C-alpha cells in the first residue's frame, strides 16, 4: 500500500518545481524451518529359547520393547517348551496351549474361532521425545500335531493395552497357520502405523482350535518382528528478527529446541554464512574443534564450508534447548544470511541439520534536490522522524512504502 502526502509551498525564488522524498524500510525477515532425521529399527522376538526381545538398526536406541506376554489363559509347556513343530529339536520355536480338555499342556477344545482374552502379546514403543512409524509386522506360526490350530493377529496403538480387545484392535490377518501338521508358515505385513511419543504398538496373536477336542497338541510361534523408523526431533521454528532500532548490521536468531532435548548430553551447534546456503556435507568434527563467536566471521569455520563460521555452541537459553534470541553483529546491510544448526549428542554424533535464513535491513540513501538535504532518525521499525531544509516554492511529495 502506498500513501501520498502533498504540501504546496509557493514562494518567490522557486528553485525546483517538484521534489520527491522516497523512503523504503525493510522491517523483519524470518524463516521457520523444521527438520527431522529418521533411523531404522527392528524389534524381534526369536522365541527359540525364551520370551526375550532384541532391537537392532540405527534406531535401536530410540525404541523400547518388552518381553513376550502370555495372557493368563495361555501357557508355555513345562517340558519341551522351545522345540516348536519338531519332536525334539531345541530352538525350533515356542509352543503354547490353553490347557483345556484334559487340563494338561497341549489340551484344546473346539473353539470355532479366536477367543477373547487368550493371546500372545508383543509391544514396542518410541522413547520419550521420538515418534515411530511401523512399516512391517512379521511372524512365523505353525503347529505341533494339529493343523487346525490357527491364530488371528491384531495390532493396537495406545499408551497402554488396557483397552485392547479384538473389537478395538485392527485385524492384520485371520486363520494364520500352517496348512499341514508339524509345519510353519511365515507372514509379513507392510504397514504404515504412526506411534507418537508416549504411545506404544501392541501386537497380539490369538491362537484357537477349529478341530475336535484334543490333547498333546501345540500352537507354535517364532520370529515375531516389528520394523520401522523413528523420527528424531530437531530444532524448529527458526526466526530471524531485525532490530527494532533499524540497525542494518545485526540480526537476532531464535528457535525452539527439539523434543526430548538433553542438555547434559546434547549440544546445539550453529553456523552462519552470507549470500548462499551452507554446504552441509557430512559433519564429523568433534565439538571441541569449534569456537563460537556472535561477531560474524569470527567463529571457527565449518569443516565442509570455509565461508560459514560458528556462531553458537551451547544448550540454549533454557533446559529444553530453546533460544530466546541470539544477536549476531558484524553483518552487511541488505544481505541474506543462511543458518545451519545441528544437535550434537556426545562429542561428535550429529543429528540432521536444520536450515533457515534472514535478510538484514537495507540502508536508504539521502534524496537530492531539496534546499537542505533531509536528515532522518530511525526510531523503530514502525516510526521515523524526518527533518529537511525549507523549499522556496514547489510541491513536496512524500511517498512511504
Image (cartoon, helix red, strand yellow):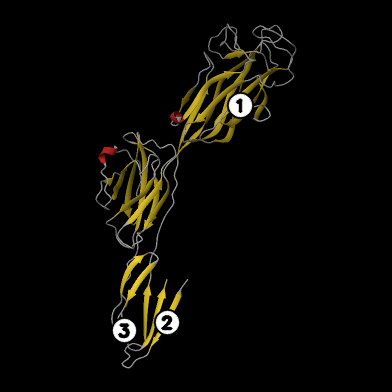
Q: Where is mark 2, residue-wise?
A: 6
Give neighbour class at mark 2: few <14, some 14-19, many 20+ (Cα, 10 Å).
Answer: few
Residue at horizontal 39%, vertical 63%? Answer: 27
Q: Where is mark 1, residue-wise?
A: 162
- All told, the count of numbered labels is 3
Residue at horizontal 38%, vertical 50%? Answer: 254
Q: Is residue 254 visible?
A: yes
Horizontal side of 107 relative to 270 (left or right) equals right
Q: Position of residue 217 (x, y in %)?
A: 66, 10
Q: Which disc number belongs to residue 390?
A: 3
In the rendered image of this protein, does residue 245 appear above or below residue 305?
below
Q: Where is residue 230 in the image (x, y as percent from the top left)?
A: 48, 35
Q: Earlier in the sequence, mark 3 or mark 1?
A: 1
Q: What element carries label 1?
A: loop
Q: Which disc number belongs to residue 266?
A: none
Horizontal side of 126 relative to 145 (left or right) equals left
Q: What element carries label 2?
A: strand
Horizontal side of 207 relative to 238 (left or right) equals right
- Closer to the eye: label 3 or 1: 3
Q: Is residue 304 visible?
A: no
Give neighbour class at mark 1: few <14, some 14-19, many 20+ (Cα, 10 Å).
Answer: few
Q: Which of 101 and 228 is in front in this view?
A: 101
- Are the two marked residues, 3 and 2, in contact with CB atoms closer than 8 angstroms? no
Q: What element carries label 3?
A: loop
In the rendered image of this protein, does residue 186 appear above or below residue 100?
below
Amino acid at each position: 500500500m502506498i500513501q501520498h502526502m502533498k504540501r504546496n509551498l509557493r514562494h518567490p525564488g522557486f528553485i525546483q518545481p517538484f521534489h520527491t522524498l522516497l523512503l523504503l524500510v525493510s522491517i523483519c525477515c524470518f524463516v521457520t524451518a523444521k527438520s527431522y532425521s529418521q533411523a531404522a529399527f527392528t524389534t524381534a522376538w526369536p522365541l527359540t529359547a525364551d520370551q526375550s526381545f532384541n532391537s537392532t538398526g540405527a534406531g535401536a536406541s530410540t525404541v523400547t520393547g518388552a518381553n513376550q506376554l502370555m495372557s493368563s489363559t495361555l501357557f508355555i509347556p513345562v517340558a519341551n517348551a522351545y522345540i516348536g513343530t519338531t519332536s525334539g529339536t531345541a530352538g525350533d520355536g515356542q509352543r503354547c496351549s490353553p490347557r483345556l480338555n484334559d487340563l494338561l499342556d497341549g489340551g484344546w477344545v473346539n473353539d470355532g474361532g479366536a477367543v477373547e482374552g487368550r493371546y500372545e502379546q508383543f509391544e514396542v514403543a518410541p522413547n520419550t521425545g521420538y515418534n515411530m512409524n511401523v512399516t512391517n509386522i512379521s511372524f512365523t506360526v505353525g503347529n505341533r500335531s494339529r493343523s487346525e490350530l490357527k491364530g488371528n493377529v491384531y495390532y493396537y496403538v495406545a499408551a497402554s493395552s488396557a483397552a485392547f480387545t479384538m473389537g478395538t484392535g485392527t485385524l492384520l490377518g485371520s486363520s494364520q497357520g500352517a496348512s499341514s501338521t508339524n509345519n510353519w508358515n511365515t507372514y509379513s505385513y507392510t504397514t504404515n502405523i504412526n506411534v507418537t511419543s508416549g504411545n506404544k504398538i501392541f501386537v497380539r496373536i490369538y491362537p484357537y482350535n477349529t478341530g475336535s477336542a484334543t490333547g498333546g497338541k501345540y500352537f507354535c510361534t517364532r520370529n515375531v518382528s516389528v520394523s520401522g523408523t523413528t523420527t528424531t526431533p530437531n530444532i524448529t521454528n527458526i526466526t530471524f528478527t531485525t532490530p527494532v532500532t533499524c540497525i542494518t548490521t545485526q540480526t537476532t536468531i531464535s528457535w525452539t529446541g527439539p523434543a526430548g532435548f538433553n542438555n547434559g548430553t546434547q549440544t546445539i551447534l550453529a553456523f552462519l554464512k552470507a549470500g548462499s546456503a551452507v554446504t552441509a556435507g557430512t559433519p564429523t568434527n568433534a565439538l571441541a574443534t569449534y569456537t563460537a563467536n556472535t561477531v560474524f566471521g569470527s567463529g571457527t569455520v565449518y569443516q565442509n564450508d570455509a565461508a560459514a563460521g560458528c556462531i553458537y555452541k551451547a544448550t540454549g537459553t533454557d533446559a529444553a534447548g530453546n533460544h530466546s534470541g541470539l544477536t549476531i553483529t558484524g553483518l552487511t546491510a541488505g544481505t541474506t544470511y543462511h543458518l545451519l544448526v545441528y544437535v550434537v549428542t556426545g562429542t561428535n554424533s550429529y543429528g540432521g541439520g536444520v536450515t533457515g535464513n534472514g535478510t538484514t535491513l537495507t540502508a536508504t540513501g539521502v534524496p537530492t534536490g531539496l534546499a537542505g538535504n533531509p536528515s532522518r532518525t530511525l526510531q523503530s521499525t514502525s516510526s521515523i522522524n524526518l527533518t529537511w531544509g525549507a523549499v522556496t516554492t514547489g510541491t513536496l511529495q512524500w511517498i512511504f512504502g
